[in-house]
Image (cartoon, rainbow, N blue to C red):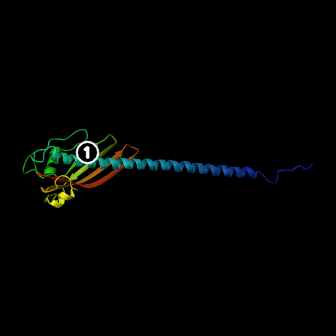
């Protein structure tokens, strides 16, 4: 009877098996690292979308604040009452002077060129909107039949015309909880059409 001996292989199968195990282990580590990176990227993207939406919301809230200041409180009022609430923080006197373009308290008062409005959402996140008046921000819109027929401008169109005031807005939202940081900025121009 013939006995076959394995002396010629000298453990090569063990070495091949160990090499395959090391290769599979490295492949597993790469897969774990890739999934962690993907998770971080999606988390950062979500945070960036949230801060963008907060900046956009600050812009929209400021447009409504300007609009309400002119119409709900009366454009011809000499002073706009304070609108401070827990939703926004700003200086109502400076805001009134910026909107009207003149001081309601003193003819020699300096009119601010910009006003900041802060919307604190929580301890980690806020939106800060800066409202400025560009040079020559007020102009007369003549009323014509073409404007009335178009009907795309909303308040102030038609045969009566109106006055338009332009405001430059810059909204910056910031999120910082110590471990995550995100910021988003939106610039825009708001047009308010006033009718007599």
Residue 12 position, x and y percent, is: 75, 53
Kindly tell me whether residue 128 is visible in this rendering: no
Q: Which residue is rendered at x = 45% and y = 49% of the image?
A: 42
Look at the picture and state if 73 lies above or below 137: above
Residue 81 position, x and y percent, is: 14, 41
Kindly tell me whether residue 92 is visible in this rendering: yes
Nearest the viewer among 89 and 109 is 89
Look at the picture and state if 127 lies above or below 188: above
Q: Is residue 126 left or right of residue 21?
A: left
Q: Which residue is rendered at x = 21% and y = 46% of the image?
A: 65
The residue sitting at the left extreme is 107
Q: Which residue is rendered at x = 70% and y = 50% of the image?
A: 17
The residue sitting at the top extreme is 86
Residue 149 position, x and y percent, is: 19, 58
In terms of image quadrants, where is residue 167? bottom left
Look at the picture and state if 192 lies above or below 72: below
Residue 174 position, x and y percent, is: 33, 47
SS assignment at label 1? strand
Nearest the viewer among 190 and 36 is 190
Q: Which residue is rendered at x = 23% and y = 47% of the image?
A: 64
Would you call the spot at circle 1 few (<14 residues within 10 Å), some (14-19), or many (20 or more)?
many
The count of marks equals 1
Residue under numbered circle 1: 118
The residue sitting at the right extreme is 1
């Amino acid at each position: 009877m013939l006995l076959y001996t394995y002396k010629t292989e000298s453990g090569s199968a063990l070495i091949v098996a160990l090499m395959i195990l090391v290769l599979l282990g490295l492949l597993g580590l790469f897969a774990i690292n890739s999934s962690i990176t993907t998770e971080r990227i999606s988390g950062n993207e979500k945070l960036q979308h949230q801060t963008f939406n907060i900046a956009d919301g600050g812009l929209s809230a400021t447009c409504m604040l300007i609009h309400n200041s002119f119409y709900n409180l009366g454009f011809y009022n000499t002073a706009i009452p304070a609108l401070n609430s827990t939703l926004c923080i700003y200086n109502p006197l400076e805001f009134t002077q910026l909107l009207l373009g003149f001081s309601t308290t003193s003819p020699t008062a300096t009119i601010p060129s910009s006003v900041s409005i802060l919307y604190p959402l929580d301890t980690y996140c806020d939106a800060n909107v800066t409202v400025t008046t560009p040079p020559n921000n007020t102009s007369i819109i003549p009323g014509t039949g073409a404007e009335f027929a178009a009907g795309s401008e909303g308040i102030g169109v038609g045969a009566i015309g109106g006055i338009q005031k332009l405001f430059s807005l810059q909204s910056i939202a910031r999120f910082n909880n110590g471990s995550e940081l995100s910021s988003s900025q939106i610039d825009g121009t708001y047009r308010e059409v006033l009718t007599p």
